[in-house]
Image (tube, rainbow, N blue to C red):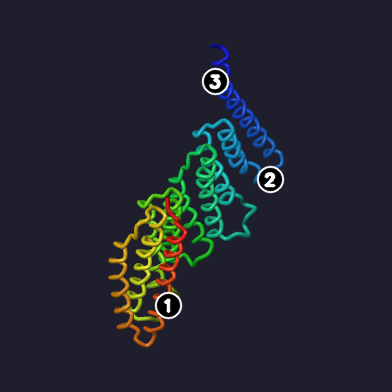
Amino acid sequence: MQETNSSTNKPNLMVTMVIGIAFISIGALFLLDQFLKTGWLTLIVAPLLGLGLLISGTIYRKPGLKIGGALVLGLGVSAYFLLNQNLDYLSWPQRIGFALISFALGWIFMAGFSLLDKQFYWWALIPAAIIGSTGGCFLLSSLRFLDFVLYIVTALGLVLLATGIFKHLLGLIIPGALLLGIGPGVYVGWGIPGDTSSALARTGSMLVVFALGWGLITLFSRVVTTKFTWWPLIPGGILAVTGWGLYIGGAPDSALHFIGNTGSVGLIIFGIYLLLMRRGFHR
């Protein structure tokens, strides 16, 4: 009985030892920075602590340590970009962007390290997508409202769709595919700089991209079922025909070119579906 208790308590003692060493290291770094006055040495304390907790939680299979370590690591790197005065060569939008992406990486680490215990924390990818795409928008866009819509909605759709494919869950594939139609659709319709098309043409192009999102449901449903999932083609077809009609009414000169391009994308989606059907890409 004593051997059993000893073996059970050994991981807890090791975790306590690791945490103790971490606190000693943190105190030493704080003390060292008082003399060196680097301006950044103190800021790496939190990332190092988070990394230590993450590694310890992985080694000793402690989910709480892994989750806490991943978040502390992400927040620590975020604080480094926001508070480090030596990064004055970066503009504030850039610093905010890097900080948000760093925080998102913490959530990604949480999901990634959970796979080592054969437990996939897929839900952690949702805040990672929202936070990371917001950071990407600060770095790569002109910070208009529709830029945020494009980045956040598209990233969230990709995460839901990829997770649904990985876990064979149609309940995640459907919203993921729809978001992939909504985000780019709103941007194509109303967010492209310098677009002088009429309101009818813009609305039409938006609806056609919405329709492609419904087509993605039919495409990726092949991951879950061997049957042809036809029902998304009804709302998708209605949206496509309505969008084409509005575009023809708003921009008749370029309507044929627009219909040809969007029709080609639809054919590509259907062709990929046939390939998946032939390869038996399903559960």
> Between marks 3 and 1, how big is the CA–CA gap?
64 Å
Q: Which residue is mark 2?
A: 38
Type of amino acid under label 1: Asn
Q: Which residue is rendered at x = 59% and y = 33% of the image?
A: 59
- Residue extending farthest to the right is 36
Type of amino acid under label 3: Thr
Q: Which residue is mark 1?
A: 261
In the rendered image, residue 21, in percent from the top left (x then y), is placed at 64, 29
Q: Residues within 10 Å of mark 3 (few under 14, many from 20)?
A: few
The answer to whether residue 117 is left or right of residue 29 is left
Between residue 245 and residue 198, name the one nearer to us: 245
Location of residue 31 with respect to 1 vertically, above or below: below
Type of amino acid under label 2: Thr
Q: Quadrant of residue 205?
A: bottom left
Q: Earlier in the sequence, mark 3 or mark 1?
A: 3
Q: Which residue is mark 3?
A: 8
Q: Secondary structure at mark 3?
A: helix
Q: Earlier in the sequence, mark 1 or mark 2?
A: 2
Residue 250's disc is: none
In the rendered image, residue 158, in percent from the top left (x then y), is placed at 45, 57
Q: Secondary structure at mark 2?
A: loop
Q: Residues within 10 Å of mark 2 (few under 14, many from 20)?
A: few
Between residue 211 and residue 234, name the one nearer to us: 234
Q: Quadrant of residue 220?
A: bottom left
Whether tag 1 and tag 2 are in contact, CB under 8 A, the answer is: no
